[in-house]
Image (cartoon, rainbow, N blue to C red):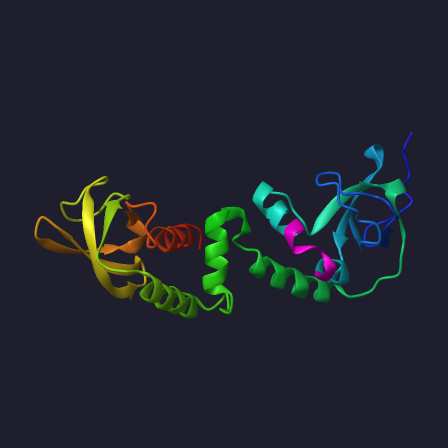
């Protein structure tokens, strides 16, 4: 026998009082959105949260979702946990707010390095690659102290340097479109130009360690 759902795709619904998020246990009563999927046999609906709910969503909740790989812009609930509501916005408004929050939390899944990355790029347009490079260049010029010892962490396409070898970073040189920030390094009396993203500071307690690690993680995930 076919089970008929009391809702249809696109309906606006609000979560009933005292309903909690099934993964984190927080109270989501009053959260509102639109139904984007119905699983009638399982008595489930997928709710895409509206812009007002997204704006009021706790920041630490979004961070937890990002860290654990969960989506936070929608949620599956039982049909009995929601009831009809009047729409409070348009899909375009939802998309705009979601994009803003995506930018804000883009690096949450990267853990401690994500915190540092957010601080560097806090006021930078995520669509402006040139501005992001300038932000990193300015940040690293301010906080790095040269020279410092580093280990080559990535295979070098050219030259004699090998993974695991130690070098002394001498200073920042320029920004390359392909390799990012380039630094001058010294080994056995010779100077080489290497991407900073291929290096790891050897002294984990050095003030240089975390800024370089933040940059390396950002470069790999940009």
- Outermost residue, top side: 1
Q: Please give the range of residues in magenta.
A: 55-61
Quarter where residue 76 is shown: top right
* Position of 163 relative to 194 (above/below): above
Task: Report x, y in % for residue 8.
Answer: 86, 49
What secondary structure prevails in the magenta region? helix
Residue at 7% across, 52% down: 189
- Left or right: residue 12 versus residue 192 is right
Q: Quadrant of the C terminus?
A: bottom left
Q: Quadrant of the N terminus?
A: top right
* Position of 183 relative to 213 (above/below): below
Task: Report x, y in % for residue 66.
Answer: 59, 47
Q: How many numbered markers are drawn?
A: 0
Task: Report x, y in % for residue 101.
Answer: 62, 60
Q: Is residue 51 covered in magenta?
A: no
Residue nearest the viewer, comparing 120 with 97? 120
* Position of 132 relative to 110 (above/below): below
Residue at 45% across, 63% down: 120
- Left or right: residue 57 versus residue 126 is right
Task: Report x, y in % for residue 124.
Answer: 49, 69
Residue at 38% across, 65% down: 139
Quarter where residue 146 is shown: bottom left
């Amino acid at each position: 026998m076919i089970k008929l759902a009391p809702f249809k795709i696109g309906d606006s619904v609000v979560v009933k009082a005292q309903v909690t998020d099934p993964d984190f246990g927080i109270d989501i009563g009053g959260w509102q959105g639109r139904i984007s999927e119905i699983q009638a046999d399982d008595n489930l609906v997928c709710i895409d949260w509206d812009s007002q709910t997204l704006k009021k969503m706790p920041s630490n909740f979004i961070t937890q979702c990002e860290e654990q790989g969960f989506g936070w812009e929608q949620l599956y609930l039982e049909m009995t946990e929601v009831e009809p509501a009047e729409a409070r916005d348009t899909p375009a408004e939802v998309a705009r707010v979601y994009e803003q929050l995506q930018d804000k939390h883009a690096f949450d899944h990267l853990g401690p390095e994500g915190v540092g990355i957010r601080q560097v790029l806090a006021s930078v347009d995520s669509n402006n690659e040139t501005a992001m490079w300038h932000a990193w260049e300015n940040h690293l010029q301010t906080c790095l102290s040269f020279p410092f010892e580093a280990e080559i962490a990535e295979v070098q396409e050219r030259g004699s340097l090998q993974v695991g070898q130690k070098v002394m970073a001498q200073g920042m040189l320029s920004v390359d479109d392909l390799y990012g920030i380039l630094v001058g390094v010294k080994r056995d009396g010779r100077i080489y130009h290497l991407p900073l993203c291929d290096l790891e500071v050897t002294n984990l307690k050095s003030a240089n360690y975390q800024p370089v690690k933040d940059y390396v993680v950002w470069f790999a995930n940009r």
